[in-house]
Amino acid sequence: MRVTASLASIYWVWMMSSALYLHFAPSASEYRTLASEAFDREEYAASVEFQDKVLEIAAMDYHAHYWKGRALSKEEDYERALVSFDLALMIRPEELAALDGKARALSGLGRFEEALSVLNQIQQRDSTSVRVQYNIAFCLQHLGRREEALTILRGVVAADPGWMPGHIRLGHMLDAAGRPRQALAAYARATAIDSTNDEVRYHLAATHLHLGDRAEAIEILRRMAGTNPSLATEVSADSSFMDLTEEELSLLSSD
């Protein structure tokens, strides 16, 4: 009789604990909010954990799979990101955002042929997106199809001349193709959009140096050094600037 009573008490305590947990445990909606806030704070690992909590409650939640993939991509965990985007696409096969995420994950894994195939699917439904064309050009470049990539990128900067990444990527490709003067023009157009962008100024300086315009290259680097105290170290380790003398490098450290 006592044993039965004890078992009943244990069962009652267990039932009450479970009820309290279910009552106070966050809902899927609350976990989504926590995941979104973590993503916005760039706390991507935490965002993934919260999305996993959503999926424990709602395994077929498209947005949880999609945003988990986005967070994993930010962490450069492209294998797991690809799984998340594939799961999202199982739920909503036509979602362009998930297709784009999948293409980016494939690119991150160096699987450029597959990424290009996915991007072509997107382009069939959104032929005017310069971002899609930009990503196609990126894949083509890595597949050794440089002239096709250049043609597409020229179309990108013509369609959206104010979009700086298009000019930067075009400059990179022209430089790699051995066309430094054309690359210089592309970087110059990018600096016209944002004259303070250090990535553009860095490549602009390297191209000037390659073309033999040392004074202009040094002047650009000196302006950059004003806001980047470690620039001299970065430049000295970069083969693009190997022709700079110790005296010229010292100018980047002066006040």
Image (spheres, rainbow, N blue to C red):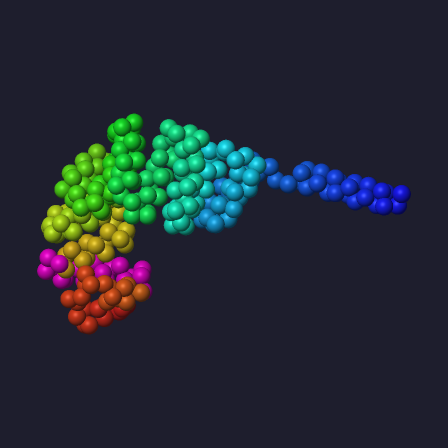
Q: Which residue is at a point 74% across and 39% down the rendered structure image?
A: 15
Quadrant containing the C terminus is: bottom left
Q: Is residue 207 magenta?
A: no
Q: Which residue is at a point 17% across and 70% down the rendered structure image?
A: 245
Q: Can you give x and y, in whole percent of width and height, for residue 97 in the image? A: 37, 34
Q: Can you give x and y, in whole percent of width and height, for residue 68 in the image? A: 45, 42
Tell me if 158 is positioned left or right of 24 in this view.
left
Q: Can you give x and y, in whole percent of width and height, for residue 243 in the image? A: 15, 66
- In the image, the segment drawn in magenta is 210-229
Above or below: residue 96 compared with residue 254: above
Quadrant containing the N terminus is: top right
Q: Can you give x and y, in whole percent of width and height, for residue 36 in the image? A: 49, 41
The overriding secondary structure of the stretch rendered in magenta is: helix
Q: Which residue is at a point 32% across and 39% down the rendered structure image?
A: 103
Q: Does the image show residue 163?
A: no
Q: Is residue 225 magenta?
A: yes
For residue 239, which quarter of the picture? bottom left
For residue 84, which quarter of the picture? top left
Tell me if 10 is positioned left or right of 209 in this view.
right
Judged from this view, the residue extending furthest toward the bottom is 246
Q: Nearer the viewer, residue 47 or 111?
A: 111
Q: How many marks?
A: 0
Above or below: residue 252 compared with residue 84: below
Above or below: residue 196 compared with residue 33: below
